[in-house]
Amino acid sequence: MAIILTGIAIIVPPYLNENSATSVLVYVKSSASNACSYINSGVVVERRPYTILNPVIEKSNYTSPGFKVLSVTEQEDGNEITISVEIGYSGEVGLTNDSIAMILKEFVVNDLVTHTDANLNGNALYYNDKRLSINIRVVRV
């Protein structure tokens, strides 16, 4: 019995840590995809959290600029998880890529805090006792 419990104590914690990083990665991708779909609808809704994204729709003249998630990567280093998202678009948007990236990041962070165990402590985002950094890059394709 002691051998089984020792085996569980050795195997389970690393599995749970990996599962935690994977879970947050999947949620960030889903949230970014949701933001892209909302922007592509070209319809403004005055309801949180979508109001964060409304300036992108308004500046794109209520058209579908073709936003899509190009890639999502995760890197874990000790007590920090960094998730990088690349989003591309093909239409005309009257904002800089950096401005769009800031808006999308705000949406994703708010979505994480609202719907997962992530929490904000000042400006730092934490998920399961690990600091979480979200990097969003926007490019025109």
Image: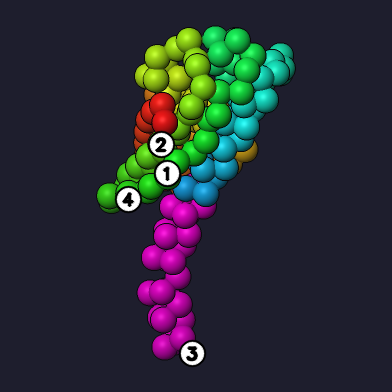
The answer to which image quadrant residue 56 occupies is top right
Tell me if label 3 and label 1 are in contact, CB under 8 Å: no
Tell me if label 1 and label 2 are in contact, CB under 8 Å: yes
Question: First in sequence: mark 3 or mark 4?
Answer: 3
Q: Is residue 25 above or below residue 54?
A: below
Q: Is residue 9 magenta?
A: yes
Q: Is residue 61 magenta?
A: no
Tell me if label 1 and label 4 are in contact, CB under 8 Å: no
Q: Nearer the viewer, mark 3 or mark 1?
A: 1
Is residue 62 visible in the rendered image? The answer is yes
**Residue at coordinates 32% horizontally, 49% vertically from top-left?**
75
Instruction: State the separation of the CA atoms marked 1 and 4.
Output: 17 Å
Q: Which mark is residue 86?
A: 2
Give the residue pinned by disc 3: 1
**Residue at coordinates 47% horizontally, 54% vertically from top-left?**
22
| Residue type highlighted by circle 2 | Glu
Give the residue pinned by disc 4: 76
Question: First in sequence: mark 1 or mark 4?
Answer: 1
Q: At numbered mark 3, what does the secondary structure look like: helix, strand or loop?
A: loop
Mark 1 Cα shell of 10 Å, populated few (<14), some (14-19), many (≥20): few
**Magenta-colored span:** 2-24
Question: First in sequence: mark 3 or mark 2?
Answer: 3
| Residue type highlighted by circle 4 | Glu
Rendering coords of residue 101 (x, y %)? 42, 24
Rendering coords of residue 35 (x, y %)? 58, 30
Instruction: State the separation of the CA atoms marked 3 and 4.
Output: 34 Å
Asked whether, in this view, residue 52 is left or right of residue 134, the answer is right
Instruction: State the separation of the CA atoms marked 3 and 1.
Output: 45 Å
